[in-house]
Amino acid sequence: MAIVGGFAFVLVRTLVALWPALALRVPGPRIVMASALGAACAVAMLALARHPALAVAATVAIAAGLAGIFPTVLGIVGARYAAYTGTVFGILFTAALTGGVTLPWLTGQLAAARGLRSALWLTVACFLAVGALQWAAARRMERTP
């Protein structure tokens, strides 16, 4: 399993390093939506995994999905609201930190009450919400210059 873990580490590092090259060819909103959907599918795979190797593969896929969300959102917002980057970044970081504090606690409460596999579905819902919010934001950005 250690070899698999080492492979997973190298793979995730490689995927994270490739995101900037991908971002030059694919619009930011599409990267965020695809990453969120991919991460949601990977967490679902982790929740359903019955073999350690599948759980490791799901974890690697989750990491790859996460790699495309936050930096891309910061890039989109920074380009869109260049005159207000400090304010907008402050709002984004506040929202991210709020989620980073409350969602692990909520997931832990659900895991204690219903088991860890059941609690992982909350994470799936959160990633799907990220994708849906990005889709709505992208549609609005298309309508307003």
Image (cartoon, grey):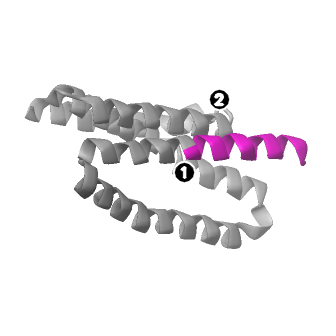
Pointers 1 and 2 in contact (C-beta within 8 Å) = no
Q: Residue at x 34, y 64 (%)?
A: 105
For marks 1 and 2, the one nearer the N-term is 2
Query: Dot 1 corresponds to which residue?
Result: 71
* Magenta span main SS: helix
Residue 51: x and y, percent? 16, 26
Is 99 a magenta residue?
no
Q: Looking at this view, is 43 or 30 the one in front? A: 43
- Quarter of the rendering containing residue 47: top left
From which residue to which does the magenta span run?
129-145
Looking at the image, residue 24 sits to the left or right of residue 43; the answer is right
Residue 128 appears in the rendering: yes
Looking at the image, residue 52 sits to the left or right of residue 42; the answer is left
- Residue lying furthest front in this view? 113
Mark seen at residue 109:
none
Q: Which secondary structure, mark 1? A: helix
Residue 17 appears in the rendering: no
Q: Looking at this view, is 32 or 71 the one in front? A: 32
Image vertical order of residue 32 relative to residue 53, above or below: below
Query: Dot 2 corresponds to which residue?
Result: 25
- Name the amino acid type tagged 1: Pro
Q: Residue at x 89, y 48 (%)?
A: 144
